[in-house]
């Protein structure tokens, strides 16, 4: 068992305590689950103004060398080779059976690729990368960097006050810039469905930058609780819940993260773990699909709830669920068999001792407001 | 005269001379859960036993079971919580009550904590 003494701290730990955060263990770190405003207020604030998230627990990894792009294509189905400089894409580490080992962001920088991976997976990801492609490229964890996310409709305006160049970036653009005297690397992306930026900042400058951002009236600190409800409303997957080694990219409806050049008939088709399974499913379809689950009443349908048809036959399971403060209703996502995956299909969710009516829908419950 | 008693699971029951009691969750419980978004109440007329899960209080993030402090028959539920579950955050020991129960065995109250005991119990959780 992990004891509290072994929990890691991010460079913002003291600031969180100072702001009155309720701290919880998460992926080996002690992190704020909420601040005094509370999850609902933090969630709504992020959708209306700007929320500041400490995501320093996530893994930042540099992959460099002449063959780095080709090497990365051996572990992800993404088109890495054609990724333009200063652009970011969503990627998946797949396994031999077509399952997902982790999901990540890959950015092509001047000298290397920057990978941002999930906290809970970072040590296994590093070991895997080292063994799979370590002979082709240099793999270096960037343990001296913290990661902040500023999300919401006012996020870019706020960040631009510190670095005017940020305003002209488009969704998934990235670049180095000076923020509050610190040499940062900024991408216009995030995990809330809102416009915003993620800022890789030297660990020793992170707290000062966070304080500088919190000085602006629009900015409120946001904990893990609202981070989860925001991403859930936006239909974004949480690794270990909505995707894992038993779900394929096609089942998870993440096929858009496999560019044409990596598909059958493409110039560099396949060549990633599980390609046979995944490319087959891309053509023939999968037996189940990730969908949104909209409860027709007010009772939240949560992770683990079984989904059944009118006759009580199991048709799927909920993988994430809760209450969406912005839609002011329960929101959930999960997997259903292909026959029940069409939007508008009425099924039942087993919640405690009863069955409640739910409708299959898009997992995106709020309008995504990316600056495309 | 009314008497209020508490459980280790942070429910309260306020009993009157008429052998009925109002049941709710304590301020500590609502604080732990955060803003409530949905409350599932027992059916009127339901027979429940002491310690049975008979209601659910849900926040954005979590669902908490409410265990009945005593056995008996549910004679009323707080219907207003369907539209405004936040009442239980704002006034957990008053307007935010959950249900009214007719006790089947008043001696069960002896197994519960009084206010002083509950305060001491809360301090022991710090």
Image (tube, coloured by chain):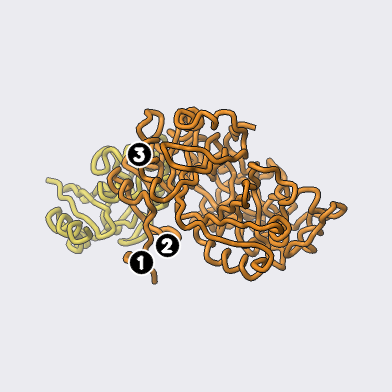
Chain colours: A orange, B yellow
Of circles 3 and 1, which is in front? 3
Determine the secondary structure under disc 3. Answer: helix
Q: Residue at x 69, y 65 (%)?
A: A136
Same-chain status of marks 1 and 2: yes
Above or below residue A265? Residue A226 is above
Name the residue carrying label 3. A211
State which chain disc 2 sits on: A
B77 or A300, nearer to the observer:
A300
Residue marked by disc 1: A6
Please state the chain letter of the residue tagged with numbered disc 1 in the rendered image: A
Which element type, helix, strand or loop, lies under badge 2? loop
Q: Is residue B104 left or right of residue B34?
A: left
Q: Residue furthest right?
A: A265
Of the residues under marks 1 and 2, which one precedes in the sequence? 1
Callouts 1 and 2 close, C-beta under 8 Å: yes
Q: Dot 2: few (<14), some (14–19), or many (≥20) neighbours within 10 Å?
A: some
Q: Looking at the picture, does residue B48 appear above or below residue A233?
A: below
CA gap between label 1 and label 2 equals 8 Å
3 and 1 marks on the same chain: yes
- The reply to whether residue A340 is in sight is no
Subunit under mark 3: A
Residue labelled with disc 2: A28
Location of residue B54 (image quadrant): bottom left
């Amino acid at each position: 068992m992990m004891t509290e003494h072994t929990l890691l701290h991010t460079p913002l730990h003291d600031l969180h305590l100072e702001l009155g955060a309720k701290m919880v263990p998460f992926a080996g770190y002690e992190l704020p689950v909420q601040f005094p405003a509370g999850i609902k207020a933090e969630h709504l604030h992020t959708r209306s103004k700007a929320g500041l998230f400490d995501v320093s627990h996530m893994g930042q990894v540099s992959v460099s060398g002449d063959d780095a792009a080709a090497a990365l294509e051996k572990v992800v189905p993404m088109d890495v080779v054609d990724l333009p400089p200063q652009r970011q894409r969503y990627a998946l580490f797949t396994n031999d059976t077509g399952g997902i080992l982790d999901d990540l962001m890959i950015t092509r920088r001047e000298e290397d690729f920057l990978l941002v991976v999930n906290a809970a997976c970072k040590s296994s990801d590093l070991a895997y990368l080292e063994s799979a492609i370590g002979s082709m490229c240099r793999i270096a964890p960037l343990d001296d960097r913290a990661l902040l996310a500023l999300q919401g409709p006012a996020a870019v305006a706020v960040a631009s006050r510190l670095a005017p160049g940020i305003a002209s970036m488009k969704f998934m653009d990235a670049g180095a810039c000076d923020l509050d005297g610190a040499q940062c690397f900024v991408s216009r992306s995030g995990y809330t469905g809102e416009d915003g930026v993620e800022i890789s900042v030297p660990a020793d400058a992170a707290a000062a930058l966070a304080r500088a951002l919190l000085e602006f009236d629009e900015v409120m600190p946001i904990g893990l609780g609202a981070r989860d409800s925001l991403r859930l409303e936006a239909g974004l997957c949480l690794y270990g819940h909505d995707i894992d080694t038993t779900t394929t990219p096609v089942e998870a409806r993440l096929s858009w993260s496999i560019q044409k050049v990596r598909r059958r008939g493409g110039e560099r088709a396949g060549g990633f773990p599980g390609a046979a399974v995944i490319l087959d499913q891309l053509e023939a379809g999968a037996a189940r699909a990730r969908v949104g689950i909209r409860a027709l009443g007010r009772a939240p349908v949560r992770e683990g709830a079984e989904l059944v048809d009118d006759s009580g036959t199991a048709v799927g399971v909920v993988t994430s669920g809760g209450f969406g403060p912005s839609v002011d209703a329960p929101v959930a996502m999960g997997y259903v068999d292909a026959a029940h995956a069409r939007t508008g299909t009425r099924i039942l969710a087993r919640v405690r001792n009863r069955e409640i009516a739910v409708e299959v829908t898009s997992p995106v419950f709020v309008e995504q407001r990316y600056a495309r | 005269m009314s008497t209020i008693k508490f459980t280790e699971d942070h429910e309260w029951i306020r009993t009157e001379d008429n052998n009925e009691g109002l049941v709710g969750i304590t301020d500590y419980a609502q604080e732990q859960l955060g803003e409530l978004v949905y409350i599932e109440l027992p059916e009127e007329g339901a027979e429940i036993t002491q310690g049975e899960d008979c209601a659910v209080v849900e926040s954005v993030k979590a669902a908490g079971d409410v265990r009945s402090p005593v056995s008996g028959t549910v004679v009323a539920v707080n219907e207003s919580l369907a539209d405004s579950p936040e009442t239980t955050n704002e006034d957990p020991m008053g307007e935010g009550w959950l249900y009214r129960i007719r006790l089947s065995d008043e001696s069960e109250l002896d197994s519960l904590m009084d206010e002083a005991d509950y305060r001491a119990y809360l301090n022991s959780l710090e």
